[in-house]
Image: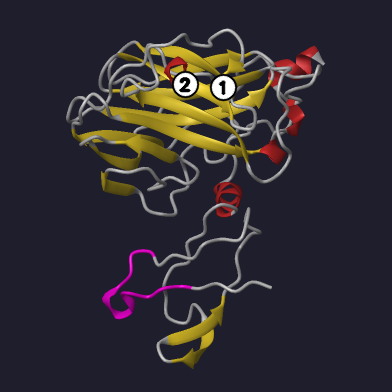
């Protein structure tokens, strides 16, 4: 058992698209001044800009064994009250093996590769959104323009079990700027604790949004059960794409891509087969429309 724990045999990475290979929405987005998903699948920007503007892209600047990374660049600096978090969300039903909230709770290890064009201290956090508990870790970017691996060994939490369903139960938060909201309190660094004030969550985090041209890169994100940071689990592109399509699917607009019939003035009905079963009933949105279909609105009907 000790040997198995050391090598983490079997499927291990709980993070989808941790190697930043899938970008269904596109490989670059400029003029970001709000929260949302813009390029890489499963990788959210949580953003209170206060004048700041970002560009996010899928970059080919990556460490050995990786092809891509997630790049954030400040194109307009903001005020000191703006904040920025890079977030990843987990469904509760994917976390039952952690045994959180029981006497059999297991430790976790989060590892990732990071690079910036500056040196700074930043904070990464795990937050249990079912029970409002969290723990954080302060890491240092020691050298500018140099890839470095961060490893964080997270103790087990015997308080607060995850809800086993398809809703969010756990979030990874990479704080790049706190805006004064998420710092100034007492951090929970050695053990899980009730979140309490938001000021406890990112104590010691630097300021990313204060300078035009600042860059931050992230890839190789792996959250695994156990006390060791093992080698990154690379999945095939096809498997990673299918896992991402559970949450978002983009159907390209091509002639003959859908068969339907007109049901009234300015209205048609057609069906499309989704490649995988989605997490929940999806919302339908027209993405990057051409002039011939501009102004289209969608309604969906499910059995």
Quadrant of the rendered structure where residue 35 is? top left
Quadrant of the rendered structure where residue 162 is? top right
Q: What stretch is highlighted in magenta?
A: 287-298
> Which part of the image, by quadrant, shows the N terminus?
top right
> Which part of the image, by quadrant, shows the C terminus?
bottom right
**Residue 294 lies in the magenta-colored region:** yes
Q: What SS does tag 2 mark?
A: strand
Where 250 sits versus 193, above or below?
below
From the image, give the main secondary structure of the stretch colored magenta. loop
Is there a contact, CB below 8 Å, between mark 1 and mark 2? Answer: yes
Disc 1 from disc 2: Cα separation: 10 Å
Q: Residues within 10 Å of mark 1 (few under 14, many from 20)?
A: many
Q: What percent of the width, then of the height, locates residue 101?
A: 74, 22
Question: Residue at the spot x=32%, y=44% of the render?
Answer: 34
Disc with the residue nearer the chain's start (1 vs 2): 1
Q: Nearest the camera: 115 or 195?
A: 195
- Location of mark 2 (residue): 124
**Disc on res. 110:** 1
Quadrant of the rendered structure where residue 164 is? top right
**Residue 110 lies in the magenta-colored region:** no
């Amino acid at each position: 058992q000790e040997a198995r724990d050391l090598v983490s045999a079997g499927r291990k990475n709980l993070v989808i698209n941790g190697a930043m290979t899938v970008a269904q929405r596109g490989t670059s987005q400029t003029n970001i001044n709000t929260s949302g998903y813009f390029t890489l699948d499963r990788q959210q920007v949580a953003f209170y800009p206060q004048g700041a503007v970002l560009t996010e892209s899928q970059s080919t600047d990556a460490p050995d064994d990786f092809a891509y990374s997630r790049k954030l660049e400040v194109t307009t600096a903001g005020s000191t009250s703006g904040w920025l978090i890079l977030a990843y969300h987990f469904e509760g039903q994917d976390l039952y093996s952690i045994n959180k909230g029981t006497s059999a709770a297991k430790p976790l290890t989060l590892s990732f590769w990071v690079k910036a064009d500056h040196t700074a201290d930043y904070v990464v956090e795990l937050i249990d959104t079912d029970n409002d508990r969290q723990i954080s870790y302060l890491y240092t970017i020691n050298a500018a323009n140099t890839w470095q691996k961060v490893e964080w060994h997270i103790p087990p939490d015997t308080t607060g079990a995850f809800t086993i369903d398809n809703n969010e139960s756990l979030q990874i938060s990479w704080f790049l700027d706190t805006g004064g909201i998420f710092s100034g309190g007492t951090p929970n660094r050695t053990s899980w604790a009730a979140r309490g004030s938001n000021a406890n969550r990112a104590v010691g985090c630097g300021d990313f949004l204060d300078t035009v041209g600042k860059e931050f890169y992230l890839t190789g994100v792996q959250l695994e059960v156990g006390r060791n940071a093992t080698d990154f689990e690379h999945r095939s592109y096809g498997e990673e794409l299918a896992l991402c399509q559970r949450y978002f699917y983009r159907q390209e607009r091509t002639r003959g891509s859908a068969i339907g019939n007109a049901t009234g003035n300015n209205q048609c009905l057609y069906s499309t087969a989704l490649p995988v079963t989605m997490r929940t009933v999806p919302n339908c949105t027209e993405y990057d429309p051409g002039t011939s279909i501009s102004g289209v609105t969608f309604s969906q009907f499910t059995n």
